[in-house]
Amino acid sequence: MQKNHLKTLAFFILLSSLLCLPLANSKLTRALAQEESEETSEETTEASPSATESLKERIEKVVEEKKEAVQEQIQELSFVKKGMIGQIERVSEEAITISNKSGTQVIPLTDNLDLVMDDETASVDDLAVDSWVTILGLQQENKDDFEPIRVLISEKTLRPRPQLVSIGAITEFDDDEVTILARGSEEELTFEIDKNTVITDPEAAKLTTDDLFEQMQCLVVGYKEVDEDESDEANEAENSSSTKHALIIRALVTAEE
């Protein structure tokens, strides 16, 4: 009887242990989860300053990049476009010296300089003394520094053609040229007539060379070709030997008059 009682007691103890085991496991699981959550929170808290520092560095980098771009834009605004024409007097590996009515100027030959001749890419070897150049570039406001960007090379003169306006009486003419005795100077000036010449009467009606006659008073507007062997003063002189071209011949009287 006592033996049966002990067996019954042992059975109840074992049953109680089995019933308490899931509860213990549940508490253990919650404890482990809470501990893991706290560790994760601590890691996140520890990582937060690092993330903030990284974000700050990125912001500073963007600000610095924008700052440089803004400074470049401001610098570009302080430059003005400038062009000049001149004849080459001297050529070296580093620069060319040109001359024009403003005097002489040294133009540096930089690596980024764009050289063009006859609408094709040129080289420094194409720069020769007595050649003419048109130089385009930038100059900072209120400063003398000039930064050339593009150079157009020409073997022909770029001097402006001297303009002529003369009034006189026709002394001789044909289909290719007309000669007048200029008023005041009493010098004979011969002008070539070509397809660009316009001949008119006093009312601006068009005429031909057949309508011209000797002693006709007329106004001649034209230009002279530039002689490279003469000075600017000589080229601008009305009586220079340079070829003269008539653009307009306007009769001041009609044949009836």
Image (tube, helix red, strand yellow):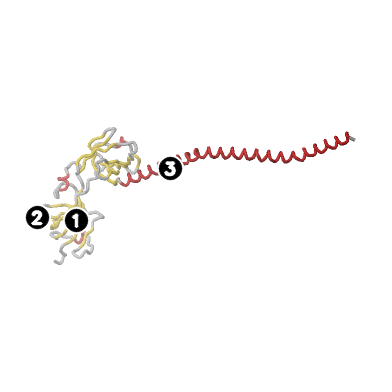
> Which residue is situated farthest in the right direction here?
1
Q: Quadrant of the N terminus?
A: top right
Residue type highlighted by circle 2 = Gly
1 and 3 marks in contact (CB < 8 Å): no
Q: Is residue 91 left or right of residue 238?
A: right
2 and 1 marks in contact (CB < 8 Å): no
Residue annotated with mark 2:
184
Residue type highlighted by circle 1 = Val
Residue at image point 22% right, 37% down:
89
Of the numbered discs 1 and 3, the one sitting upstream in the chain is: 3
Residue type highlighted by circle 3 = Val
> In 3D space, how far apart are the residues under numbered discs 2 and 3 (Cα atoms)?
76 Å
Residue annotated with mark 1:
221
Q: Is residue 77 left or right of residue 229?
A: right
Of the residues tagged 2 and 3, which is closer to the observer? 3
Q: Is residue 66 left or right of residue 185?
A: right
Q: Quadrant of the C terminus?
A: bottom left
Q: Which mark is residue 33?
A: none
Residue 201 vertical placement versus 225 (above, below): below
Residue annotated with mark 3:
62
- Label 3: few (<14), some or many (≥20) within 10 Å? few
* Residue nearest the observer in this picture, 214 or 52: 52
Task: Return the x and y of residue 86 as percentages of the image width and height.
Answer: 24, 42
Of the numbered discs 2 and 3, the one sitting upstream in the chain is: 3
